[in-house]
Amino acid sequence: MLTNMPRLPRLPLQNLPAFRATARLQNLRAAAQELNLTHSAVSQQIRGLEEQLGFPLFHRHGRRIRLNPAGEALLSGVERAMVQLEEAVHCAVAAHGGGDEERLRLTTLPSFAQRWLMPRIARWHERFPGIALELHTTPELVDLQRDGFHAAVRQGRGPWPGLANEMLSDAPFYVVGSPATARRLLDLPESALADEPLLGSAEAWAQWFATLGIRRRLIPVASFNDAGMMLQAAEQGLGIALARELLAADALANKRLMRLSPRSLVLEGVYSYHLVYPPQLRDWPPLAALRTWLFDEIHRARLAAHLDLPAGV
């Protein structure tokens, strides 16, 4: 038989933002500025919350204020609840879409957008005409929920806290160059590549040449903070590049670039591509459509890129 338990007080939810801000900033005036309220309004909300609960939540020393153990316990629960509410709002906005046309906001690296995604946008619209894809590119890591994005294509190891992630590709790197470079090197051994102008990271090239048993100082003619720019330089015959297969797929299929060796390399410290998104959106139809389309297009790109592989490779 259950014993009589003390009746819990009703929690005045309207006072929780003031409590949360004050607890985080440990200053009533700073909390008031953040909430766009007066100092006295925030103070009254905190007092009202404590009166409703029947016990204090803060230690007060003059103007200084800090959480006591009861306040710390309450803040832990409030933070979890607020995060869940924010996620629920994010999902509601995503599910609402925009009128008859749903909109999916995707952020990714400039190189991935330029070399792989943009050439396929027309096929996205053909397959999913009712879903507008809003693309944002940046080399910086974006907070999806804070900045209002539904998903991202990221390069890394993961996991990313609070986000679901699915690996899209961990394809290796190959040595590529322009068709003119490929013709010039046609009958030469792989070791001749060490005498070519190199594009990209000296460390990456050192790893690749080590697989040939070549260990010497390598000085690339140019390095890049964007893989798309490096591949463009290789297409223009400025040198040879170590390229991730996914980004070079179209150029390989269209013969703007050629593989100069069947030898591949998994570079240490260079990571796979992942689709990441808030787990609450997993079954949202536009995101499910994006996930299916990305995997289909990656498979298609690999088939096309492999057309120029030597027999048996």
Image (spheres, helix red, strand yellow):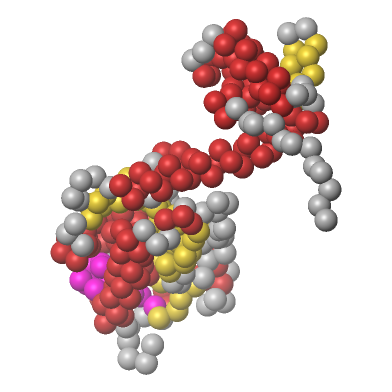
If the image is split into quadrants, where does the C terminus sit? Answer: bottom left
Residue 40 seen from this side: yes
Q: Is residue 260 magenta?
A: yes
The residue nearer to you, when weighing 33 against 1, is 1
Compared to residue 279, the image places residue 34 above or below, namely: above
| Residue 278 x, y percent position in the rendering | 47, 53
The residue nearer to you, when weighing 260 against 106, is 106
Residue 195 seen from this side: no
Q: Which residues are magenta?
A: 247-261
Q: Residue furthest front?
A: 1
- Horizontal placement of 38 versus 121: left or right? right
Compared to residue 195, the image places residue 233 above or below, namely: above
Taking the spot 29% from the left edge, 79% from the top edge, the residue there is 303
- Horizontal placement of 242 versus 124: left or right? right
Compared to residue 231, the image places residue 213 above or below, namely: below
Taking the spot 78% from the left edge, 7% from the top edge, the residue there is 62
- Horizontal placement of 39 versus 175: left or right? right
| Residue 140 x, y percent position in the rendering | 45, 43
In this rendering, the count of numbered labels is: 0
| Residue 9 x, y percent position in the rendering | 69, 31
- Horizontal placement of 264 versus 12: left or right? left
Q: Residue furthest bottom?
A: 312
Taking the spot 40% from the left edge, 53% from the top edge, the residue there is 152
Compared to residue 183, the image places residue 160 above or below, namely: above
Taking the spot 17% from the left edge, 59% from the top edge, the residue there is 129
The residue nearer to you, when weighing 209 against 112, is 112
Q: Is residue 113 magenta?
A: no
Quarter occupied by residue 240 = bottom left
